[in-house]
Image (cartoon, grey):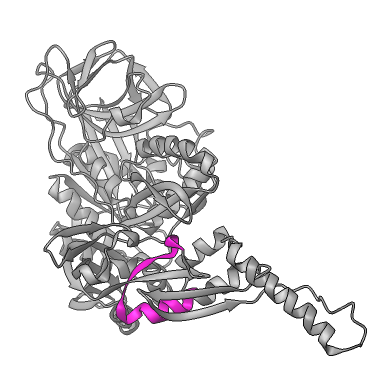
Amino acid sequence: MDYIRNFCIIAHIDHGKSTLADRLLQLTNTVSERDLQAQTLDDMDLERERGITIKSHAIQMDYEYQGKKYIFNLIDTPGHVDFSYEVSRSLAACEGALLLVDATQGIQAQTISNLYLAIENGLEIIPIINKIDMDGAMVEEVKDQIVDLIGCKHDDILEASGKTGLGVDKILPAVIERIPAPKGNESEPLQALIFDSVFNSFRGVIAYFRVLNGTIKKGDKVKFVNTGKEYHADEIGIMRMTQEPRSEIKAGDIGYIITGIKVSREIKVGDTITHVNKPCLESIKGFEDVKPMVFAGIYPIDNDDFEELRDSLEKLQLNDASLVWEPETSLALGFGFRCGFLGLLHLEIIQERLEREYDMTIITTVPNVTYFAYTKSGEKLTVNNPTDLPDPTHIDYVEEPYIKAQVITKPEYVGSIMKLCMDKRGILKNQVYLSPTKIELQFEMPLAEIVFDFYDQLKSISKGYASFDYHMSDYRESDLVKLDIKLNGDNVDAFSALIHRSKAYHFGSRLCEKLKELIPRQQFVIAIQAAIGAKIIARETISAMRKDVTAKCYGGDISRKRKLLEKQKKGKKRMRQVGNVEVPQQAFMAVLKLND
């Protein structure tokens, strides 16, 4: 165990984690030159296209140092705030972390929050300045920022370039010297933590685990403590570029296990694996359940695909433990699922993965957050969906979730960022100069306001120089109303939204205008209305497509034309009573992009 090191790479989004991981794989000859590509560990097409890491990836490397052979277990983690759950799980399997900071951008919001996560887990931190080869690199300034943040010495900070490989050879010796070897006892009962899982259509569920105590051998009868299920370890092994089977895995190491599980509910990330005949005394603690921030309905376009969508979500949940879902029905869309996500990018990624990996064509409803409604009789109701909100006459007050937001930017953008946050009902709590060219703003604001397009707007007004991070604070009373959209007098529940009273009129009128553009014209008039309770606050009308019924009248008495027009009018009126309005998929998506 003295020759094992478990560590992960943490950083803000786009600071070069995956590129540095590529260089480490190259340096240790884990990957042949032929197989090496940019973002080697990112195995999803989606990750390569967008240049972001969505899943944590574990890999084992061998390294010789001062005549001794060491085993490194490296986990590359995502950087985006929506995937911080992946980061927290990776940290639970490690003793140390490489903290990467971009030399051209310095410390940013996600750098700080990931660092705090690592410190909470008691990890040894090795600070590294990346991208030192770039023209705009401010190495000394960034070093000062890191010293202020962590309190380390200037000499402790390593300099590297993931792109050119400069300075990368100093990182692995630093890992050996600074990161402690794993602690554990091979002779104690087996105690292993599941930190990730994937679904393979041929092998079933593959769980990735870190052995804290004991030894696991191929063919052992094992038990998953939280679910209480027992299995045979059909195959165990380590993760290289491909999975390599082994006969046993000992304390301190990271590996995978295949037990032939086909049902996703039988495995939980954060569960403990132990032996059936000699179980450990207690399960491993420190794994909290994920708390979704944003909720949206996902419905199949064809209702016959409902069961297939359920299977796809179950398999996807194995690859992404932060996805939460339950069945629900909608008058407009039929049967579907209410899904909980960690943020809007997370929602977008899940939607893309369902379409790409499982060939599902789906409709997504307006995202919203969880509210608490208190009735006049003193009852507290959880509202995940605007349709769950009771009648306004029964409501005493509604509480909405607030977040603590942290924005790090350049001083010249402070004014416009403050205006954006104030428009989103934010309250400025603090501002601190981290350096002459970097300022940190702290706000308290409603989560519902940042769900839609806050991140995009922040990036555009700061020309990409603002970084953003947030965490839940508490629930506060708020003047919220339920906004309904009616098509020809019928409510379309997929468009319902809970919104602050001061913004309801503007949002309702914008939505009506957008729907008028997107809903195709029918043979009859369509009235699009936005309503709060019984009060209509905005309206748009889509006129009917009309056939020119008077074309055959050449001159003659006007009463002949009027008779034909009256006949057409009656037909249109009857058609409006029985006709259904088809709402295209773009209309549901348009709500998300109202400010474009």
Q: Is residue 558 magenta?
A: no
Residue 258 sits in which quadrant? top left
Judged by its main secondary structure, the magenta piece is helix
Viewer can see residue 63: no
- Measured from the top left, where is residue 431 in percent x and y? 19, 77
Which residue is depicted at the point 54% across and 79% down? 540
- Measured from the top left, where is residue 482 in percent x and y? 33, 70
Q: Which residues are magenta?
A: 492-511
Instruction: Give the farthest residue toward the left.
Output: 281
Residue 318 sits in which quadrant? top left
Residue 219 sits in which quadrant? top left
- Measured from the top left, where is residue 45 in percent x and y? 51, 44
Q: Is residue 16 above or below residue 140?
A: above
Q: Is residue 250 above or below residue 21?
A: above
Q: Is residue 498 magenta?
A: yes
Near-viewer residue (539 or 93): 539
Viewer can see residue 340: yes
The mark tally for this picture is: 0
Which residue is depicted at the point 47% across and 49% down? 334
Quarter that holds the N terminus? top left
Which residue is depicted at the point 35% across and 65% down? 451
Q: Is residue 549 left or right of residue 57?
A: right
